[in-house]
Image (cartoon, rainbow, N blue to C red):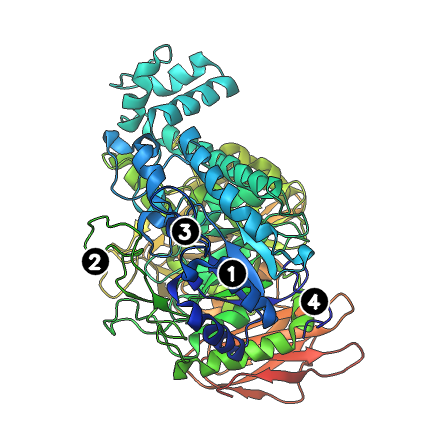
Amino acid sequence: MRAADRPADLRRDLVVSGEVHYFRLAPSEWADRLDAAVRTGVTAIATYVPWLVHELPDRSFDFGERHPHLDLERFLDLCAERGLAVIARPGPFVMAELKNEGLGYSVLRRHPEIRAIGWDGRTRPETIVDYLHPAFLEAADSWFDAVIPILAAQTIDRGGPIVGIQLDNEIGMLPWVTNSPDLSDRTVAELVQSLAAESSPEAVQERYGVGATSFDVTDPATWGPALRSPVEEQVLALHRDLGRFTRDRYARYVQHLRDGVRARGVGEDVPLLVNVHGCWGERATMFPLGISQLFHTWSDGVTLPGTDIYIGDLDLDTLPGLWASTAFLGATCRDDQPYGVLEFEVGSGDYGEALDVTCGPEAAGLKLQLAIAQGSSFVNYYLLAGGRNPELFEPVGDGNDRIAFTGERHGFAAPIPPEGGVAPWFGETAHVTAAMTDAADLLRAARPERPPVTIGFVVDHYMTEYRYPGSTREAEFVAELERFRGSGAREIMTRALVVGGYAPDATVIDGPGAFADLPTHRVLALAATPFLDDDVQAALADWVSRGGRLLLSGPVPQHDMEGLPATALTDALGLEVGVRDESGLHTMTYAATPGRTPFVAPSVTADGPAWRGAEVAVGFAQPLTPRQADADVTPLAHLARSGEPCVVEVPLGAGRVVVAAADLPCLPEIWDALLARLGAAPAIRVASDNRGVVVVPCRTPDGVEVVHVVNVSPWDTAVALERDGRPLTDEPFALARRSGTWLVRRPGELRARVAYRGPRG
């Protein structure tokens, strides 16, 4: 475990923390809850420090002088007494089911002008504000004037327990989930002026003065009404411009907070953090949207990003979304920039006390091991301890006059219930937590090995947080992106790579410069959508021609991100792309329209069938035809009904491309065959009698191998691992359903040994 003679360091150590809200507990309960937290195995505590809770009706702030449950310093002292580090989360926004999302009532009452105006001039009831409005920043600064000096006095460099401070919370989440961008007059004016500065006023007029619009670049009074209710000819231009502009505004907001925290006494030795939202419907499929919104906020290489993960159980269904989200986050960080999970779901899942959604006791342990295997170095259990929501200091007439909208009890699904004690089902998570902290130095040092395949993360494909409700064109555009981006249709591409043993990482594609330093010896697996900018396509083709190897899975891009024709990639490959043959259902296949389901069969190559297997049903297929009859194009699969190729291999310069213009099923014989044609093979080959085993090889700088093996399936299995043509273990080992283990092999050792086995064996 971490050396006891030095404090925890989020930049160097593996830190597992648990969220405990002091303001939801009586001071007499603090010691008991912290002691319970220690018994669960965590080495740190995280807590929000809410503006709403500490602000009194006269706009002053109370930190325990009048109300003991707000004695923040005493709570921090109790953490320090137990050797628990602290991650403080002082907002300004904190969410946490608090009213106003944790903002003090005073700023909203005194400054209604900070509330954002959205589509068609509407203002939502949620607390959506202009983050950069001077009145909001002034009020936030006043809150920081009160709270940051208290935290600064308790930071690790001054002998206190605080090892990190989070800036705001889930920035951009509320505008996304409500589809309510900030289109207030001052924000729209800033947008138009920035566009004019980047190009020219005439270019902006040409871009937005189209169709039946009132937009006139010379008349600022027209800007807000026109862009709040855009016409169809404008929507995709606005989609791009607004998304990129908002990214920049979020980065400037975080920079303001970062500067404010440092100016108020928090030293550079204390890292600052940003948490990222994005789970939806108990899945992480949408999560990269939050990364797309916020990745500029940690591009300084110093700020540490962390995810908020709420997916319930980890199984074969939720696996690809979680894997891709962590890989994409890691890809946005520098090699020496830690990342982790700032809200790691450990509750029972019964957040409504209806017993309608529950997680098994093994879920948290599986997700924890996978997070560590993928390189996360800090994980915060949320919510570790429940409590009660006290009443506000003045009635607000909202039905309960408490600080939160969850009623009196809060965190009733937490491992430590509101009344105290520890839920019996948490034993499995405590088991794996203790194992992780006991082996913290080794696990932190063992970083994921560079895999043979990297997934392309096209950040603008996830720039879909806003869409004008009245636009059919934009709705269709967004639907195509959501269907095919990231992990591919039905998330099959990432699922196939992960359970196939490839343990892919990711590569950020944010413009044509993304390929300048991309190694050509690894395969780039890119889930294509119909939309990819022409300069990006051209740069991708150039990378392949320099020796790169590309697996393009999905519909071949033929338009740019504004819907204009863009065919640089197909031009380079010499392919004509036909009309997509659709099944009628995106989720496939049992209820697809009879007679419309496309079927794909492997083609016969010079070496025999492209893969072993029968004809398969797919959700879509797209014919691919060489433009030249004598072109060096190898058909690998074809539409059964017409014989037209839909999966082909094409050489390009010194590199090669496999284009799979069909959502092929998750069958190892298919994906292994396609990747083998590009020269890719797993670093560790996995043999088991089920297909739900995930293997992640890691290695320390001094050559110690740590191999994580996680069975996310509902089936017990036997696992045999092979590396460099030799068995990795003396014999196959049993791995129970929904359990994990890790193996260790030190330099000079012939075989790896089991160093940890989960509580299920």
- Give the side of residue 45 with respect to residue 312, left or right: right
Q: Residue furthest top?
A: 218
Q: Earlier in the sequence, mark 1 or mark 4?
A: 1
Mark 1 residue element: strand
Residue in front for this viewpoint, 314 or 578 = 314
Q: Earlier in the sequence, mark 2 or mark 3?
A: 3
Element under disc 2? loop
Please tell me whether mark 2 or mark 4 is closer to you in this view.
4
Q: Amino acid at mark 1?
A: Val
- Mark earlier in primary sequence (1, 2): 1
- Residue occupying the point 62% across, 66% down: 14
Q: Which residue is mark 1?
A: 341
Q: Residue at x 38, y 33 (%)?
A: 239
Q: Residues within 10 Å of mark 3 (few under 14, many from 20)?
A: many
Which amino acid type is shown beneath numbered disc 2?
A: Thr
Residue picked out by circle 4: 445
Residue marked by disc 3: 54
Q: Which mark is residue 677?
A: none
Q: Which mark is residue 593?
A: 2
Identify residue type, mark 3: His
Nearer the observer, 702 or 359:
359
Q: Position of residue 699 (x, y in %)?
A: 70, 68
